[in-house]
Image: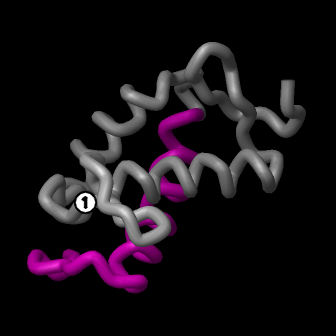
């Protein structure tokens, strides 16, 4: 089990991103799914990583979005760049090596 008092640190972001990639690889086998559905699924299986009070600080600016959602999107982008998944319009994702 992960530490319950995680802070918005590089280790926390790395942990979310790695866990999100594992989750996405499994979840998208049953896809395609919208990004919002993937947020819900990840929050269900990894609630200890989904701290909504830790807000994203992109380029030094704080946003209203939790850090974990930002890192889930980074994980999606990692898998897309590695050609493991592809984007399905308008805001969905599925397993597939060819970007369409």
Please name the residue shown 27% across and 53% down the image: 66
Q: Count up the numbered dots.
A: 1
- Out of 25 and 5, give the one closest to the viewer: 5
Span colored in magenta: 1-28
Indicate left or right for 29 with 80 as reference.
left
In the displayed orientation, state which residue is furthest to the front: 61
Q: Report the residue marked by disc 1.
A: 55
Say which quarter of the image contains residue 46.
bottom left
The picture places residue 79, in percent across and down from the top left corner, at: 69, 51
The picture places residue 22, in percent across and down from the top left corner, at: 51, 57
Magenta segment, principal secondary structure? helix
Say which quarter of the image contains residue 100.
top right
Please name the residue shown 61% across and 14% down the image: 90
Residue 23 is inside the magenta segment: yes
> In the picture shown, does residue 74 fall above or below 89?
below
How dense is the environment of label 1, judged by Cα within 10 Å: few (below 14), some, or many (20 and up)? some
Please name the residue shown 85% across and 39% down the image: 97
> In the picture shown, does residue 41 fall above or below 34?
below
Residue 98 is inside the magenta segment: no
Please name the residue shown 44% across and 63% down the image: 58
Instruction: Label 1: state its secondary structure.
Output: strand
Q: Quadrant of the N terminus?
A: bottom left
The picture places residue 77, in percent across and down from the top left corner, at: 65, 50
What colouring does the structure picture have?
one colour
Indicate left or right for 73 with 2 as reference.
right
> In the picture shown, does residue 20 fall above or below 26?
below
């Amino acid at each position: 089990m992960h530490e319950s008092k995680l802070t918005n640190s590089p280790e926390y972001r790395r942990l979310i991103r790695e866990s999100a990639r594992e989750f996405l690889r499994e979840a998208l086998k049953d896809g395609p799914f919208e990004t919002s559905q993937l947020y819900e699924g990840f929050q269900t299986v990894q609630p200890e990583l989904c701290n909504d009070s830790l807000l994203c600080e992109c380029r030094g600016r704080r946003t209203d979005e939790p850090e974990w959602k930002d890192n889930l999107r980074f994980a999606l982008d990692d898998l897309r760049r590695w050609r493991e998944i592809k984007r399905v319009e308008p805001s969905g994702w599925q397993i597939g090596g060819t970007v369409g």
